[in-house]
Amino acid sequence: MVATLSREMQVFIEKEHKTVAVDDFSGTAGELLRRVGVNPETVIIVVDGLLVTEEVRVDGAAKVELLSVVSGG
C-alpha cells in the first residue's frame, strides 16, 4: 500500500472575506481563478507573497491571495 499526501492550497478571496481550501491543484494562476469562480479582471494574484500573472504555475503554493482591484476617478 502506498500512502499519498494531499497538498491543500489556501486561497484567500478578499472580496468575499473568506479562505477556501483547494486540494491537489496543479495548474496556472488563471486556471485556479476559474476553479474558485473568480473573474481575473477583478483581482491581483499574490502567491506565497509574490505578485504573479495568470500565466504563472502555482503548483505546490502554500498560500494564494486574490486581492480586489479598486479603481475610480
Image: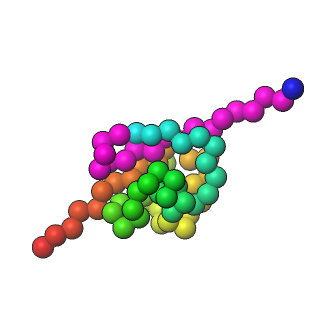
Q: Could you tell whether 60 is left or right of 39 in the image? A: right
Q: Name the residue furthest left.
A: 73
Horizontally, residue 32 falls left or right of residue 3, namely left
Residue 2 position in % (x across, y down): 84, 29
The percent coordinates of residue 30 (x first, y second) are 51, 62
Q: Is residue 63 left or right of residue 3?
A: left
Q: How many marks?
A: 0
10 to 15, vertically: above or below: above
Q: Is residue 50 visible?
A: no
Q: Residue at x 47, y 51 (%)?
A: 36
Instruction: Please provide percent x and percent y for residue 67.
Output: 34, 54
The image quarter containing residue 45 is bottom left
Question: Which of the image's four quarters has the N terminus?
Answer: top right
> Where does the magenta region start and end?
2-18
Check residue 36 for magenta coloring: no
Quarter holding the C terminus is bottom left
Q: Residue at x 41, y 49 (%)?
A: 65
Of all residues, the one furthest to the bottom in this rendering is: 73
What is the residue that sits farthest to the right in this orientation? 1
Q: Residue furthest top?
A: 1
- For the point 55% across and 67% down, the residue is 55
- Against 6, residue 73 (above or below) is below
In front of the other: 34 or 29 = 34
In front of the other: 46 or 33: 33
Query: Image height check: is 8 above or below 72?
Result: above
